[in-house]
Amino acid sequence: MATIDSTPKQDGFHMPGEFEPHAGCWMLWPERPDNWRMSAKPAQAAFSEVAEAIARFEPVTMGVSKAQYVEARQNLSAAIRVVEIPYDDSWIRDTGPTFVVSGEGLVRGVDWEFKAWSGPEPPHYASWDRDALLARKVLDLERADRYESDLVLEGGSIHADGEGTVLTTEECLLNRNPDLGREGVEEKLIQYLGAEQVLWLGEGVHGDGTSGHVDNLCCFVRPGVVALTWTDDRSDPQSQRSMDAYERLSAARDARGRKLEIHRVRQPGPLYRTKEEAQGVVEVEGTKRRQAGERLPASYINFYIPNGGIVAPSFGDPHDEPALAKLRELFPDRKVVTVPAREILLGGGCIHCIVQQRPRG
């Protein structure tokens, strides 16, 4: 498909809210032995559960490598489309395209610059050539025209309300793009997301190796309404981060001039990687190490909004049930289902990080 030499905003396209109708959802099959323990078998089981849960609401496409095609096909139901596609790791939220739509119902995609979550931290693995090409390949398969942006950005660093407002964090995008500065990054977001206003939060979830992706901290429930990860424990390093976000959100107005309705969702744990969970990961030079005792960036905000549903993480934690109840309160017209997500968390993310919606347009 064609690469468009303009921007979505210039052409009347914008990023819709995740709660708007989807044509389907993309995922990638986990297999990296230097990121997923036990040859990724536990992670594959968890990804399968997420895929099957989403397939209850909308079509799911699972991208797999040639080596893993038979394994994935055998472990996924016939409801899941399985296609071969090269990639480095399975975080399609970050490496896939960001889809944008026009008022006439056309769908295109933004292909961002991907550098494996580097800045200020080093890249999470030594090479990412296949991930850097993934967005373009997905857009070809979707027969969607492409916008190319030089902004270093992963999809987990942005959330949109579909009405002109975008959420992000300073911790992530300002460090990814130090030469642009705040105004430069903001202008890129406005142009490539078809936005009118950027709401800047400070830091993301404590211990998040993505350097503060907003999708682990805060998300739009619907226009004018957000959910925010929270703790009442003032000694927890997350407390100040969430309080700062709450204060910024309380003082903000969105692109339509509304004050935001903010719902606080208690975080799980804190949760930590066990010695057993740190074993079985192959150490490779250049790949971020997974160490016993490190805090895991667990958050109930890292859920996905398919058509008519919510697919949310559970962690075997006492706070699972209160979080589930809160999500049912926030989404009364959707069926809320949970999937055990600790194995996904061990790889560095959660449910929202491993999916990418394709809007219906």
Image (tube, grey):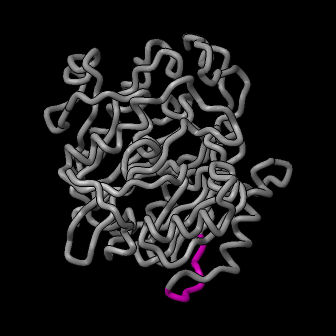
- First to last magenta residue range: 256-262
The front one of 57 and 106 is: 106
The front one of 31 and 220 is: 31
Compared across the picture, whether 257 is left or right of 41 comes to: right
Q: Residue at x 28, y 15 (%)?
A: 67
Is residue 314 visible from the viewing direction of this image?
Answer: no
Tell me: residue 128, above or below residue 10. above
Residue 133 lies, in percent from the top left, at 37, 37
Q: Residue at x 59, y 50 (%)?
A: 213
Is most of the magenta stretch helix, strand or loop? Answer: loop
Which residue is at the far left?
A: 78
Count of numbered badges drawn on the protein: 0
Residue 223 lies, in percent from the top left, at 45, 76
* Quarter of the view holding residue 239: bottom right
Residue 333 lies, in percent from the top left, at 33, 69
* Quarter of the view holding residue 210: top right
Residue 237 lies, in percent from the top left, at 80, 48
The front one of 293 and 161 is: 161
Tell me: residue 56, above or below residue 123. below
Is 346 part of what is drawn in magenta?
no
Which residue is at the far front?
A: 5
Quadrant the C terminus occupies:
bottom left
Is 261 part of what is drawn in magenta?
yes
* Quarter of the view holding residue 355: top left
Is residue 69 visible from the viewing direction of this image?
Answer: yes
Q: Residue at x 61, y 65 (%)?
A: 184
Q: Residue at x 44, y 37 (%)?
A: 91
Tell me: residue 160, above or below residue 285. below
